[in-house]
Image: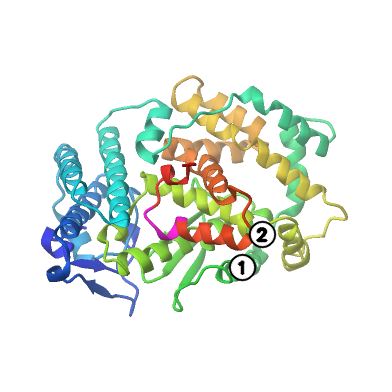
Amino acid sequence: MIRKLMALALIAALPGCAANGSKPAAGKSAVASIDVRRTPASAQAMNDIAAAYVQLSLEIGTHEDGYIDAYYGPADAKTAAEAAPRDKAALLAATRDLSARLDGAARRVSDPMERRRATFLRAQLRAAETRLLMMQGTRFAFADEAERLFGVRPRLKTLASYDADLAKVEALAPGDGPLWQRVEAYLDRFTIPKDRLQKVFDAAIARCRGRSAAQIAMPADESFRLEFVTGKSWSGYNYYQGGYHSLIQVNTDLPIRLSRALDLGCHEGYPGHHLLNMKLEELLSRGRGWAEFTVYPLYSPQSLIAEGSANYGIDLAFPGESRADTERDVLMPIAEIAVPSDDRYWQLLKAIKRVSGARLTIAQQYLDGAIDRPTAVALTQKYMLVSPERADQSVRFTEQYRSYVINYGLGEQLVQAYIERGKPNREEMWRRMAKIISEPTLPADLLPR
């Protein structure tokens, strides 16, 4: 991902190469040129820094698989980065030098959006510095790591504080044996047969898209491709490929329950990752010529916004009883699942979600060395109410992505608080969502002012 700095400074590259070696989509490439003669000196300095940031990010990505979640700038820049990356020590020094350049340039910026751009880049560079230190063996406490990488310091509840919520789950899953077994046995009734997965997910994503498109304008040529895969530590993933196109993958290692259809349809698609990346490409990398938005480093504050808005987007798209109605009237018949005669299923899912914050506390204790792996798995079973297999998958995710886990629950809380502040109407809630996913948003932007 490395091109000469001046060339990158003059280009806002659009579709092309995606993360993980994906090839540019045919007919999707486009380049928006920045006319330097009409660009104020302060803005041009920011463009030069953005170009260096893209180069830096791509080179860091050669040292850690998965560091670059998405890239859709010039393909030759990525090729150059892979051919001759600097070593980690040199990249760390370059990151610090670029941060110093940014501090100087930011003092000359007066435009409010350019100031937000500078603040965003500063946070992204701090995350890059942190990740490079971690690649070289530095280990931070969970809360410190999360704050440096994702821009917010988690203050987590004790596990015991979730016991009252567990009691509410137990009231909905009476019987003998461990609570997680009773919950799993009941929820297994709502497993989607493998031969119905494609049809159920197609229908779910279509409804997520329809509700989102009614509120947020989308590019006419946007699209995605859905794949079912195995051998992953996650349940779903969006690989944004530029040109308003995504590859959405769903992991079938474990049986997929009906609730995951709308969850993943909204989270990975609309109004989640696919829509967020499209709006950033449309309005920032293309619309403003900001090259920094052609690259997405996974371990950065960008991820808290992405995961938080994607999680909250589920309830935004399907408020109140509309989710249960859609699952009961549309998805269950497609899945050939017997429709329950009462609301116990949906009540249980809501009760389980209230305990979900325990996952972060377990991750913190495990990564900080307060508990060992078997204990982490056992606690995950108890508080996440899952089988040993699902608990192991959750712990494997924590081992691979570490403090990234805060971005889901904590990110959702921040996005929800911002969007629902002052009890706005539905139209205003969607307007706020559109703002979050269309601008250089940081976690601090979501806090009360």
Pick out the residue farthest to the right: 341
At 35% from the left edge and 35% from the top edge, which residue is drawn?
148
Magenta range: 436-440
Query: Circle 1 — which element?
Result: helix
Is the Cβ of the residue at disc 2 closer than 8 Å to that at disc 1? yes
Kindly tell me whether residue 409 is visible in this rendering.
yes
Magenta stretch: includes residue 437 = yes
Q: In the drawing, does residue 5 fall left or right of residue 216?
A: left
Pick out the residue farthest to the top: 370
Decide: is 45 above or below 374: below
Q: CA distance from mark 2 to mark 1?
A: 8 Å
At 19% from the left edge and 62% from the top edge, which residue is drawn?
77
Q: Amino acid at mark 2?
A: Phe
Q: In the drawing, does residue 387 fall left or right of residue 79?
A: right
Magenta stretch: includes residue 229 = no
Q: Which x, y percent locates residue 297? A: 33, 50
On the image, which quarter does residue 76 sit in? bottom left
Decide: is 72 above or below 45: below
Q: Which x, y percent locates residue 389? A: 60, 39
Q: Amino acid at mark 1?
A: Arg
Q: Which residue is mark 1?
A: 211
At 31% from the left edge and 54% from the top edge, which residue is drawn?
112
Which label sits on residue 430?
none
On the image, which quarter does residue 300 sit in? top left
Q: Which residue is mark 2?
A: 318
Q: Which x, y percent locates residue 252? A: 57, 54
Q: Which x, y percent locates residue 266? A: 57, 59
Q: Quadrant of the N terminus?
A: bottom left
Decide: is 214 above or below 62: below
Query: Circle 2 — which element?
Result: loop
